[in-house]
Image (cartoon, rainbow, N blue to C red):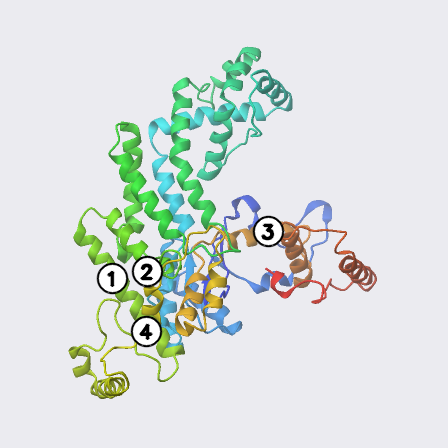
């Protein structure tokens, strides 16, 4: 198995994804076909755009590989790097932090550089919970029943007749799961529970159903207790499934929603830990231990997840403080979290102000106290003199000694926007960037942070299906055209309307017709497809 790292700048953010090559067989891509003396095809130059690391590679070497990519692509401003939880990734991030310091582009010394993939953490949490004896037995028997019926088209047809006989009104179909992927197990259980009566009816018409499932490798037919456990698991896993769906997206902002989802999971686990169901308490305890390992304290989380909530005009700091009071039983812990988030947010804003602020703008201050305290004045005599001059000028003009508010103070002093699920947070910051020139740049970078490597892994999986062992000599431009065309055709937000796009279609046909005779790559004119549609 190979680990493929993709370095992709997205408003100063990098997403490094690890491939699961077991399903797509990307490790076999290349000129290794030996069927019937087939001539070996030359390896496509497409793969030269990516760096491949073996699992045994040294963590420093992995960091050097990412560094080489950034240098080759002339990317020198990196805000975050999203990786999974492999220990070698931690070492690579440490190496890159030092390098970025030398480049002079590190924000606060790379304090927020390391972003752990939320999807990987959720997967680890759920897998720990499903290791219980009763959960494993129930899932195993239901999985065996589904596999038995799906293994034969005749059985599947008879099962469909049972569904009609039982008058089950659902569009869900039986689906096989991958045991190592809990989300597919959730979908399998969801459909199976809806069709429970059909399973009972099928046992009456297929005499081999009970006998075959009683033999290895099966564990028997599902019992009523198994179905009860399955319904409980569906309720349990449904929250995590919704969480994974919310972070899988790559066409919209996700970082501002993670805190809400994590908080909901934390409170849910605490509720189940105090419940009456012993088995559910045991499962919740395992998951809570894994939860605390990655998200149990503020030091273990990337603070950008908190800042993104503050930069959401619908929530701001008030919502975050309210959430801390609800999550933490000890008021001291809640107050400590509030102070750390406030100070960290202010420090990051100050760093951005030093980089992008204009001369003469108001100096930053703490969210809770004046930055120009006596200690700060004594440490910096120049700032102290400038402070007195500014205050004297304000005194002469207005007669009052009032400090000018910073951008972040102005932003937080305004009432939050009304909640709207269709609210476009990026558009809001674009419109209000003249009012908050520095804070909007900070919001641009934070809201662009990818919290999951799922999108990059999916891109690699798609490339592996396009470029396989029997089609391995395509040019990079052809591969790009195939992958992008497939992506554009699947976009729900931009449905294809032939009647309205006849002119564009005729232009594309001419291009394709010319390429057929010249054997050149398909180039889609820029006047046909908008630049922003290139994924």
* Residue holding disc 1: 340
* Residue holding disc 2: 303
* Residue holding disc 3: 462
Tell me if label 4 and label 3 are in contact, CB under 8 Å. Answer: no
Q: Could you tell me how far apart the alpha carbons at marks 4 and 3 are, in whole angstroms?
A: 47 Å
Q: Earlier in the sequence, mark 2 or mark 1?
A: 2
- Frontmost of labels 3 and 2 is 2
SS for tag 2? loop
Tell me if label 3 and label 2 are in contact, CB under 8 Å. Answer: no
Q: Earlier in the sequence, mark 1 or mark 3?
A: 1
Q: Earlier in the sequence, mark 3 or mark 2?
A: 2
Rendered-image quadrant of the C terminus: bottom right
Front-most of 318 and 152?
318
Tell me if label 4 and label 1 are in contact, CB under 8 Å. Answer: no
Q: Earlier in the sequence, mark 4 or mark 3?
A: 4
* Residue holding disc 4: 406
Q: Could you tell me how far apart the alpha carbons at marks 4 and 1 are, in whole angstroms?
A: 19 Å
């Amino acid at each position: 198995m190979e680990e493929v790292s993709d370095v992709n700048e997205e408003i100063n953010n990098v997403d490094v994804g690890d491939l699961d090559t077991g399903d797509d067989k990307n490790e076999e891509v290349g000129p290794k076909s030996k069927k019937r003396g087939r001539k070996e095809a030359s390896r496509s130059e497409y793969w030269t755009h990516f760096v491949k690391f073996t699992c045994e590679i040294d963590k420093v070497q992995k960091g050097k590989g990412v560094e080489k990519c950034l240098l080759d692509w002339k990317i020198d401003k990196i805000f975050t790097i999203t990786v999974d939880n492999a220990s070698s990734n931690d070492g690579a991030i440490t190496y890159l932090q030092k390098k970025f310091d030398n480049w002079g582009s590190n924000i606060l010394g790379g304090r927020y550089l390391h972003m752990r993939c939320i999807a990987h953490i959720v997967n680890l949490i759920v897998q720990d919970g499903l290791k219980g004896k009763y959960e494993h037995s129930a899932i195993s028997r239901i999985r065996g029943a589904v596999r038995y019926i799906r293994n034969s088209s005749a059985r599947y047809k008879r099962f469909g007749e049972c569904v009609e006989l039982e008058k089950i009104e659902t569009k869900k179909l039986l689906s096989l799961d991958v045991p190592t992927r809990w989300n597919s197990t959730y979908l399998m259980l969801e459909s199976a529970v809806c069709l429970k009566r059909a399973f009972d009816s099928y046992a009456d018409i297929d005499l081999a159903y009970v006998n075959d499932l009683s033999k290895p490798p099966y564990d028997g037919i599902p019992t009523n207790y198994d179905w009860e456990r399955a319904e409980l698991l569906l309720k349990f896993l449904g929250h995590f499934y919704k969480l994974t769906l919310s972070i899988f997206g790559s066409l919209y902002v996700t970082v501002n929603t993670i805190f809400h989802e994590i908080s909901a999971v934390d409170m849910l686990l605490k509720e189940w830990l105090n419940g009456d169901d012993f088995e559910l308490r045991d499962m919740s305890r395992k998951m809570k231990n894994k939860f605390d390992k990655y998200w149990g304290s503020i030091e273990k989380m990337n603070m950008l997840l908190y800042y993104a909530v503050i930069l959401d005009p619908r929530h701001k700091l008030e919502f975050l403080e309210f959430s801390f009071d609800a999550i933490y039983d000890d008021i001291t812990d809640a107050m400590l979290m509030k102070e750390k988030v406030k100070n960290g947010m202010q420090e990051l804003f100050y760093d951005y102000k030093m980089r992008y602020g204009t001369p003469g703008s108001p100096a930053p201050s703490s969210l809770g106290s004046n930055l120009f305290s006596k200690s700060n004045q004594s440490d910096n005599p120049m700032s102290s003199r400038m402070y007195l001059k500014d205050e004297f000028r304000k005194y002469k003009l207005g007669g009052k000694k009032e400090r000018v508010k910073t951008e972040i103070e102005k932003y937080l002093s305004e009432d939050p926007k009304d909640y709207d699920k269709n609210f476009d947070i990026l558009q809001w910051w674009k419109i209000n960037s003249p009012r908050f020139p520095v804070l909007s740049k900070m919001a641009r970078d934070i809201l662009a942070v990818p919290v999951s490597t799922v999108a990059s892994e999916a891109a690699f999986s798609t490339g592996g299906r396009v470029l396989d062992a029997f089609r391995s000599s395509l040019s990079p431009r052809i591969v790009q055209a195939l992958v992008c065309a497939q992506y554009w055709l699947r976009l729900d937000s931009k449905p294809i309307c032939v009647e309205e796009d006849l002119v564009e279609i005729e232009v594309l046909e001419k291009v394709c017709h010319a390429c057929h005779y010249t054997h050149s790559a398909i180039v889609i004119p820029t006047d046909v497809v908008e630049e922003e549609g290139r994924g």
